[in-house]
Amino acid sequence: MVPNLGPKRACRALTSRPRNALFAPKGTPKEIIAKLNAAAVAALADPPCGPSSAAAGQEIPPREQQTPAGLGALLNADSEKVVANHQGGQTSSAE
């Protein structure tokens, strides 16, 4: 069941930003994670993929954020915003 937040509260801080990420099962060896990450970073830097995706409106994170740790930090920050908004805090998704 989804709670009814009411019309004013529901839209006050509602934002939507698509996220694309690669996930692997828990326990995947770090060497495999590193290989997958390297392939994803290379694809994002390849002109037919990364720059054309950015031109189409897809948000490509800076290189230093294209890591498992960078994704974790982004997801944690997003989660904190959702929790704060649910608890009535004033948050902004603008970064």
Image (cartoon, rainbow, N blue to C red):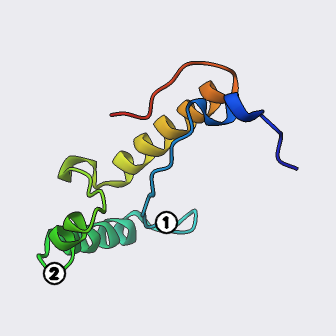
Residue furthest front as drawn? 7
Residue designated by label 1:
23
Count of labels shown? 2
Residue at disc 1, secondary structure:
loop
Q: Which mark is residue 77?
A: none
* Residue drawn at point x = 34 percent, y = 72 percent: 36
Name which quarter of the figure residue 29 lies in.
bottom left
Q: Residue 80 appears at what percent x and percent y?
A: 55, 31
* Residue drawn at point x = 19 percent, y = 66 percent: 55
Above or below residue 73? Residue 45 is below
Name which quarter of the figure residue 7 lies in.
top right
* Residue drawn at point x = 50 percent, y = 39 percent: 78
Looking at the figure, which quarter contains the C terminus? top left
Residue designated by label 2:
48
Single out the mark in the foreground, 1 or 2.
Answer: 2
Q: Amino acid at mark 2?
A: Pro
Q: What separation in Å lies between label 1 and label 2 (alpha carbons)?
A: 23 Å
Residue furthest top as drawn? 89
19 or 9: nearer the viewer: 9
Q: Residue 59 appears at what percent x and percent y?
A: 29, 56
Residue at disc 2, secondary structure:
loop
77 or 12: nearer the viewer: 12
11 or 91: nearer the viewer: 11
Q: Residue 43 appears at what percent x and percent y?
A: 22, 75
